Amino acid sequence: MTDPSVQAAASSAATGATGADRLRLEGVSTFYGEAQVLKNISLTVGAGQIVALLGSNGAGKTTLLKTLTGMLAPRSGRILFEGRSIAGLPAQGVIRQGIASVPEGRELFGSLNVMDNLLIGTYSLSAGKRKEALTDRLEMVFSLFPILRERVRQKAETMSGGQQQMLAMGRALMALPKLLALDEPSLGLSPLLVAEMMRVLKEIAGQGEISLLLVEQNARAALKIADYVYVLERGEVVLSGTAREVMESPVIQAAYLGG
């Protein structure tokens, strides 16, 4: 994407989304060995916002999530969560700060049942927080995904792809996160299930307690629910703006929306 309008818009990326910042990345660069994948990434996620990351395969979206969640350490830059630096923390430390992830591929424990997978989501919590998770948050998960309540004793490996995605999201929510990072939650789902998944994400954010950072190749679905959008290409932010602004970009329409 080398259209001049995209390059000009990239300068707005550093200002990020509006509202009180829950998450802020400032000039983050990440490498695999000597190969640089993320190049000076700056973005913000406000409290209760849905922020979408769009980009083609290899753009750096998953690497950004891995850097955020402690799977990779940035070579430079700052990652601030509620004003505290979390750059370089291990994954467990990031979870304890209030960031949970739903990875691509779900990474469920297939031989365990639904309830056991949900309980795994509470492993990093203190005793008091675990009690909260096992009451109020468990009820929230069952309200969002009624099928999980019906199948608490079913093994994860016997569930459909859509049900497994619900379980992966439910497990992440059981960690009582303030920010949920999702990597391709619509991957492999039917159009009907994609629409339902996006509705649920909108409902989660609408409650105001949890922000969402959403990596999606289904740009059309993501743009329908996102408050703010960043477009990555070759490890750089090349465009950012509100969902409406990004959707109206001729380059985005051509590259992602078939316009």
Image (spheres, rainbow, N blue to C red):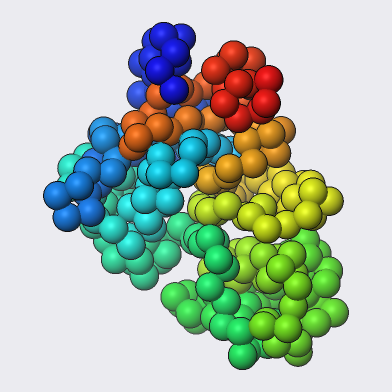
Residue at image position (53%, 73%) is 107
Relative to 27, say whether 98 is above or below: below
Instruction: Determine the residue located farthest toward the left in the rendered image.
Output: 34
Q: Which corner quadrant of the image does residue 236 belong to? A: top left
| Residue 223 visible here | yes
Residue at image position (64%, 41%) is 218
Assign the N terminus to one quadrant of the image: top left
| Residue 176 visible here | no
Relative to 79, say whether 183 is above or below: below
Q: Which corner quadrant of the image does residue 42 belong to? A: top left
Residue 51, horizontal then vertical, whole percent:
55, 37
Residue at image position (68%, 58%) is 188
Residue 203, horizontal then vertical, whole percent:
74, 48
Residue 29, horizontal then vertical, whole percent:
24, 41
Q: Which corner quadrant of the image does residue 77 belong to? A: top left
Assign the C terminus to one quadrant of the image: top right
Q: Is 51 left, or right, of 191 in this rendering?
A: left
Residue at image position (41%, 9%) is 4
